[in-house]
Amino acid sequence: MFKTKTRQTAATSGDGRIYSSADVSRLAGVSLRQLQWWDEQKVVSPSHEGHKRLYRTEDLVEVSVIAELRRKGFSLQKIRRVLRFLQKEMAKRLTEILNATSDFHLLTDGKSIYLENDAARVIEILKAAKLPMFLVSVSDQVRRLTATPRKPVRSETVAAVKKAKAI
């Protein structure tokens, strides 16, 4: 069988929320198979409970950023560099991002990577860039992901229908 990487419990994550694979797939706009492959390749390694993958808010943000960069044509190798940088910075700044105290933007050309919250600095980086820069608003991704109400999983819906029929 697979050896799984264990992660810290949700109590130590940014806001304590836990998301299922189905929730992450729906919120980030990626397939369940893509999530499974990223876990197997150790791109994003959620915690595991049996065969279930459980994602913290930090994992959900990472998946969302990865999906956005993939849509923009980034290779997985370049995304891994961005993720290493983002994981270091997110550990320091996730509370600020979740509390929406300021807007954070990830800028990258695949080699240089910046996480900025000052709009003037973002403009400076874009002006000075020698290669095309891609911008992902991490704050907007977080707001979009955390503001969406959770849709019940199919199994919960089926259980509710069976309960209603029993009455």
Image (spheres, grey):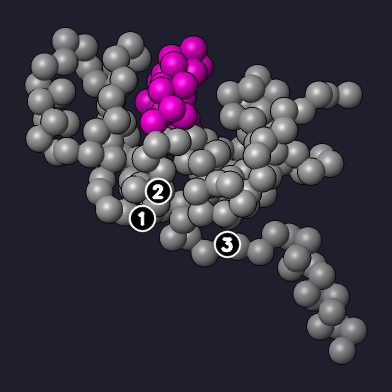
State the count of labels.
3
Residue 135: name its quadrant.
top left
The residue sitting at 13% across, 31% down in the picture is: 121
Tell me if mark 1 has few (under 14), some (14-19) or many (20+) residues whose alpha carbon lies within 10 angstroms of its own. few
Camera-nearest label, 2 or 3? 2
Find residue 8 and report its image quarter. Answer: top right
Q: Main secondary structure of the magenta part?
A: helix
Residue bearing mark 2: 95
Answer above or below: position of 55 versus 155: above
User: In this orientation, which residue lies closer to the viewer: 87 or 73?
Assistant: 87
Give me the disc on residue 150: 3
Of badges 3 and 1, nearer the viewer stands 1
Residue, x 15% and y 23% (percent of image)?
A: 125
Span of residues in magenta: 65-89
Element marked by disc 3: loop
Residue 78 painted magenta: yes
Amino acid type at mark 2:
Thr
Front residue of 102/34: it is 102
Mark-to-mark CA distance, 2 and 3: 21 Å
The residue labelled by disc 1 is 99
- Residue 10 in the image: state x and y as whole percent: 63, 49
Q: Position of residue 158 (x, y in %)?
A: 79, 67
Residue located at (46% from left, 24% from top): 83
- Please check the rendered image and state whether residue 159 is part of the magenta-colored stretch, yes or no: no
Q: Nearer the viewer, residue 56 or 43?
A: 56
